[in-house]
Image: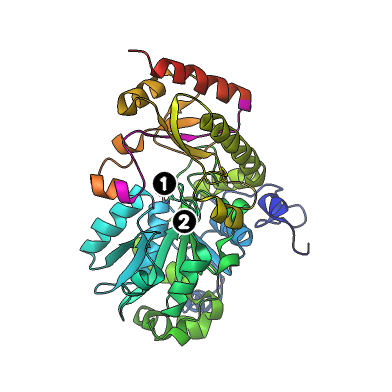
């Protein structure tokens, strides 16, 4: 198949069976692999031949899913992780260590803010948060010789700001560092960050990629275009790795240096490995990703339009509403759809917001977004509860904000549920 389209890759990429092999991706439920000679295993440990050593580092079921995700993003290699949090930790820690720092958009997922601002701080790594309204000069001033990367989310969770990928890729590259983009909400169906200059893509596959809310997982994808050697800032990639007696990732693995190191060093040492069964379930979700994103995005836009003219709604945030301040970027970066996530403020503030949520029948209150079922959440009192008011504001999250994740149900049923709950939100 020459250049199959994304819809085709979702179904066909990764596992391709040979004569009389199982049609469906098998679950290789094995921690261990068998070798014909001690010499062959020695070569595996030297990383001089490809193959599986131990399921903490790689597994055939997981590897096929990694191949599919890599194909969808257009990278040179992908690594699945046990969660999106693990993917973000490994993506950053792979090229940033104690005493170093990185630049990060403040409009990102609350869990990632905790990881970066609290836990990674304890590891000696400093996240320098920036806002979108800062000028290039203001951002430039935050870089120093210890800055290792720039980080942002394609569609920020839950602020729904759209990352100006080209702008931040240029800023990062001017300083000789890569741009890492969390592409969880957009998925490669709506945006492929590598096409706009991003260098590394991360995912919480727990969301749309799985799509059924059945398995937590993450992925790191290497775009393979960042020149680590030319940058001169990454001895961990360009100098011998003492834990592999002398492997030099850029010399020995070329364009796949970053993702190889992430796997053979970080996954080996940190062990945030996805289980083969989890990878199998993720693959089932990926098969319908393109189809689901089409419906999620159509439904999301329909709900946003409906809320925008509803008298009981103060404001609506959806990147592809023409009145959104994100609209121009959304048109540029999001191919025809902005996912099913919509946020808005109900008239009557926090109390009415709670009442609205309690009155929904079809949409369920869950701590989750981006699956087939319509769901609703109040970020300020739940997922983002640990954040200070200042962090909430910097993240674009108000106390009255309702975040709805519109599923793939019939749009009329979703709208009817929202309408009846809005009516009830105003009752005493
Ligand atoms: C959910 C989420 C994460 C964290 O992923 P988990 O799979 O829950 O660990 C990271 N980034 C974004 C944008 C998310 O929505």
Give the secondary structure at mark 2.
loop
Residue 399 visible here? yes
**Residue at point 35%, 53% (across, down):** 112
Q: According to the image, label 2 marks what residue?
A: 31
**Residue at point 35%, 56% (across, down):** 106
Position of residue 248 measured from the top left corner of the image (x, y, whole percent): 44, 84
Position of residue 22 measured from the top left corner of the image (x, y, whole percent): 70, 49
Left-right relation of 143 to 9: left
Position of residue 336 measured from the top left corner of the image (x, y, whole percent): 65, 48
The magenta region covers 393-411
Viewer-side label of 1, 2: 1
Comparing 302 with 373, the one in front is 302
150 vs 372: above or below? below
Q: Indicate the quadrant containing the N terminus: top left, top right, bottom left or bottom right.
A: bottom right
Left-right relation of 426 to 230: left
Q: Are marks 1 and 2 in contact (CB under 8 Å)?
A: no
Q: According to the image, label 1 marks what residue?
A: 159
**Mark 1 surroundings: few (<14), some (14-19) or many (≥20) residues within 10 A:** many
Q: Could you tell me how far apart the alpha carbons at marks 1 and 2 are, in whole angstroms?
A: 40 Å
The numbered mark at residue 368 is none
Q: Is residue 401 magenta?
A: yes
């Amino acid at each position: 198949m020459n250049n199959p389209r994304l819809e085709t890759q979702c179904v066909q990429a990764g596992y391709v069976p040979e004569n009389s092999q199982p049609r469906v991706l098998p679950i290789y439920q094995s921690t261990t692999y068998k070798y014909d000679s001690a010499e062959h295993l020695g070569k595996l440990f030297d990383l001089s031949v490809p193959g599986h050593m131990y399921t903490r580092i790689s597994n055939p079921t997981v590897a096929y899913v990694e191949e599919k995700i890599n194909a969808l993003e257009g990278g040179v290699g992908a690594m699945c992780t046990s969660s999106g949090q693990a993917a973000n930790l490994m993506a950053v820690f792979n090229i940033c260590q104690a005493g170093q720092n990185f630049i990060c958009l403040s409009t990102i997922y609350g869990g990632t803010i905790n990881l970066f601002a609290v836990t990674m701080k304890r590891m000696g790594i400093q996240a320098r948060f920036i806002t979108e309204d800062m000028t290039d000069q203001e951002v430039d001033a935050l870089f120093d010789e210890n800055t290792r990367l720039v980080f942002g989310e394609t569609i920020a969770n839950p602020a729904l700001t759209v990352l100006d990928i080209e702008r931040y890729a240029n800023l990062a590259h001017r300083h000789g560092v890569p741009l890492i983009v969390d592409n969880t909400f957009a998925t490669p169906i709506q945006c492929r960050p590598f096409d706009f200059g991003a260098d590394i893509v991360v995912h919480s596959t727990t969301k749309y990629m799985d799509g059924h809310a059945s398995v937590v997982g993450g992925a790191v994808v290497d775009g393979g275009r960042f020149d680590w050697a030319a940058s001169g800032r990454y001895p961990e990639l360009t100098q011998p790795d003492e834990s592999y007696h002398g492997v030099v990732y850029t010399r020995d693995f070329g364009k796949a240096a970053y993702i190889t190191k992430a796997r053979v060093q970080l996954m080996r040492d940190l062990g945030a490995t996805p289980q083969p069964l989890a990878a199998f379930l993720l693959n089932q979700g990926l098969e319908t990703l393109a189809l689901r994103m089409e419906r999620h995005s159509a439904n999301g836009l329909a709900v946003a339009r409906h809320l925008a003219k509803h008298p009981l709604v103060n404001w609506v945030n959806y990147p592809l509403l023409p009145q959104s301040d994100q609209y121009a970027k959304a048109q540029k970066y999001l191919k025809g759809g902005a996912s099913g996530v919509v946020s808005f403020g109900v008239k009557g503030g926090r109390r009415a917001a709670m009442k609205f949520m309690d009155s929904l029948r079809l949409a369920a209150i869950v701590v989750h977004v981006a699956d087939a079922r319509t769901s609703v959440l109040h970020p300020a009192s739940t997922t983002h509860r640990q954040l200070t008011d200042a962090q909430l504001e910097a993240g674009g999250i108000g106390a009255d904000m309702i975040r709805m994740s519109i599923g793939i149900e019939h749009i009329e049923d979703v709208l009817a549920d929202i309408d009846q709950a809005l009516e009830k939100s105003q009752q005493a």
